Image: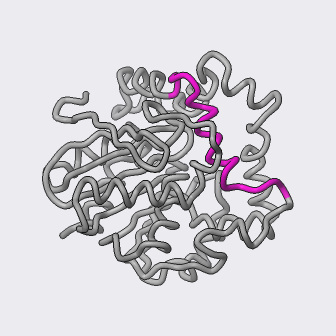
Amino acid sequence: MTQGYTDHYFETRGCRLHYVEAGVGPLIIFYHGFPSFWFSFHHQMTALKDRFRVVAVDGPGVNLSSKPTDISLYTLKNLALQIDDLGRHLSGDEPFYLVGHDWGAALAWSFSQHLPSRLHKVVAINAPPTNQLLALLESNLEQQTRSQYMWTMRSGAAHQAMTANNGQKVWEQAYAPFRGRPHYTPEHDTIFRAGLGQAGAIDGAINWYRANIPERGNVNESDYWPSRHASTDVPALLIWGEDDQTFVPEFIDNLGHYAKNLTIKRLPNVGHTPMLEDPEQTNLILSDFLDV
């Protein structure tokens, strides 16, 4: 499964990041969402590694990366600067491509808003920019309802259930829907179980929410990073699985305020994880957009 891929570690800003790479060419950094790790992009890496140097990261707290207890190390600013450090480590001052899903997509948007000169293009899969999400959490009742998990899983019964037995319940809920699909094999299931089962990985991933999503009803101006109205001119692509239940689709109507050079590709009958649910279509869209 991982033939031709190599594992590496990189020390940056209080964290030891694990990443996997393959291929030769322009650099693409892939960044996963919750609850996942680098392997969520294995289909895309396989499809693109003949033309690109593909690198997928385990974020802080996740899988084989370090799991610091200092919550400040999980803030968007620190995460974005980690990406910049990794990009410079891999390809010097040369701009790169950044592709993210869920939290990784929110981070990719923020990175493109803060450091646009570092990117050729940015791709977000099924997530709004973080500053747009915070605005929705202030004003959109449906998004507040959909986002209840962002608060309930931090402690108490929900947290205990998610972290018990090395994340067994999270693994079952997150990946059971893919079983039986021809592109999702028992080996894939085993790899995802191993990643989510790393000691402390579920709680480490929840630290992203503790660091960046304020308590309910308590969003302040200082919570927005880079700022409330930050936008990017970097050529941007949103891949949107239309059956997504995590984010309200209305955010797409205003997404142009946050990304000025925007392309949107919608996938009907696909949910929150297009790269795992419909890798063939996702790969075609990515390949076309990233074409150099």
Which of 129/93 is in front? 93
Can residue 197 be found in the magenta stretch?
Answer: yes
Q: Quadrant of the N terminus?
A: top left
117 lies above or below 136: below
Q: Residue 60 placed where, x, y %?
A: 50, 42
Using the image, determine if residue 87 lies above or below residue 290: above
Residue at the front extreme, as displayed: 14
Q: Kindly identify the residue that appears in the image at 59 percent across and 39 percent down.
A: 205
At x 44% / y 35%, what residue is drawn?
65
* Residue 64 falls inside the magenta stretch: no
Q: State the quadrant of the C terminus.
A: bottom left
- What's drawn in magenta, residue-wise? 196-216
The image position of residue 36, as x and y in percent, is 50, 38
Quadrant hosting residue 5: top left
User: Can you see residue 77?
Assistant: yes
**Residue 6, image x and y in percent?**
22, 35
Residue 16 drawn above or below residue 197? below
